[in-house]
Amino acid sequence: MRFPKKIFSLVIVLAAVLAASCGGGRPAEQADLVLTNGAVYTMDAAQPWATAVAVAKGKVLYVGDDSGALRLRGGSAVVADLGGKMVLPAFQDSHIHLVTGGVELGLCNLNGLRTKEDVFEKIKAYAAANPGAPWVTGGGWDLPVFPQANPRKEDLDALVPDRPAALSSADGHSAWVNSRALKLAGVTKDTADPAGGRIERDPATGEPTGTLRESAAGLVEKLVPELGPEDSIKGLKAGLELANRFGIASIIEASAGERILDAYAALDRSGELSVRVLASLHVDTDKGTAEVERLVKLRDDYRGARLKSTAAKIFADGVMEPHTAALLEPYLDRPGDRGTPLLEPEAFDALAVALDAAGFQIHVHAIGDRAIRMSLDAFEAAGRANGFRDLRHHIAHLELIDPADIPRFRALGVAANFQPLWAYADTYITELTLPILGPRRSRWLYPIGSVAGTGAVIVGGSDWSVSSMNPLEAIQVAITRRGPDDPPGDAWIPEEKVD
């Protein structure tokens, strides 16, 4: 995963697609904003570049040369000479956690810390600065910081000895807790792993180490005091500020329960929701097709000027590093262990058929090649049952795709929702992924170029706050297959570069 950075180039967000306004005669309306002397990337193949843009009341009137734009200026128009800086249409982030990421900024925020020492220092400082907090909560710790991605409760006990602590990993699929939290939850060496989760245990004693994977994290997290509505709204405002700064004008909220939906709805009503939001409603897969009725009601209840809730989020598996991603073949270091899907294929198919019939865009978290194949199979089942319609179902993350499944994205009309910023050889790859997959399978990690080569629809998301929200860094990595700060050199899996 990656670390947040600032954009150093100027991105000016336009509220409409530039290509739709290229050329044309003089409209009746006069511009109140004119941008000149720029490098305007229009997304129009017939006229990819221009120098000027004229805008009236937030809508683009004209894209072309300076003289054409200046002819449209009104008497009180603002005219900005860009000095050759670049102008882009706005970005869409197709997979982001804007509310929870914003909330995390105000908690014990460990994002971007690359050493244990830095992590420990931040936790100790946060605990000292918040003596009245009943729990120390937050997260963002990177898995490679700790041996086997397995932080220990003893370290957290030393940092937070006086109250329970629960800190989620950067990817949200693990939790690091101290002994007080384990005791409150009643988790001991005799506690069985919950379905779809794992309690990491000391190999010598069998005692919990303090790391909880997937659903096991819920054993402790259910005890953490809930945030109030004002906390979610404050977090959303912080997330929106970052999104606006990065030129992001629309998003897909990757997993939304009612607390998150309430925050979006509140700002939509007040006129403060500065991006368009498609919320993916979190699906309780244990309830199967019975969930659809509840989701339809949420879809009806949570809609507004800039908010719609027409997508449904399914988690098909976990993540690669702690061996919770579902694979077609076993992990090299765990013979016989292929990871565990979070729902059975038959249940997945039935749920996809029901959601598709109800008109939902289905948004699936799938990391491993087995989970990805199950997802494609479920979409194929939905299409055969209901007819193949343009609902634009997504599969997100797509870390390891079996090459036999690559053509199926285009064939089924499924959008490949990659997080391009992850597609380079960082420590997540070199220390935690390559050793457990081996070179043959690792050739197919984040195969963006191969999927794009089939003509499938490719969309990109940041998965913030898992990694940086900066879309320009993601574009850079997709093109170079090297880290944003890496010096020039060989690409990682160069066949998967895009242009």
Image: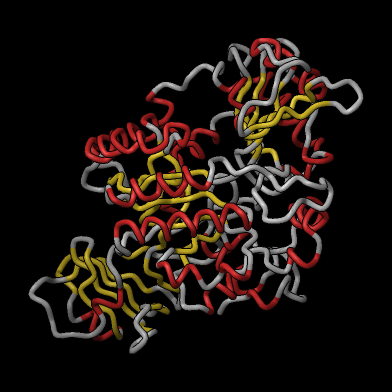
> Farthest bottom residue?
46
Display coloring: secondary structure
Residue 476 visible here: no
Most foreground residue, 263 or 316: 316
Q: Position of residue 228 (x, y in %)?
A: 41, 21
Q: Position of residue 398 (x, y in %)?
A: 58, 58
Name the residue located 26 percent from the left edge and 66 percent from the top edge: 78
> Farthest right residue?
204
- In the displayed structure image, the side of residue 406 where residue 152 appears, left or right: right
Most foreground residue, 264 or 47: 264
Kindly indicate the quadrant of the structure image that contains residue 424.
bottom right
Name the residue located 33 percent from the left edge and 52 percent from the top edge: 356
Whether 383 is drawn above or below 95: the answer is below
Whether 212 is drawn above or below 371: the answer is above
Residue 320 visible here: yes
Most foreground residue, 428 or 263: 428
Name the residue located 22 percent from the left edge and 43 percent from the top edge: 304
Whether 62 is drawn above or below 323: the answer is below
Name the residue located 27 percent from the left edge and 51 percent from the top edge: 359
Kindly indicate the quadrant of the structure image that contains residue 23.
bottom left
Most foreground residue, 482 or 486: 482
Question: The C terminus lies in which quarter of the figure?
Answer: bottom right
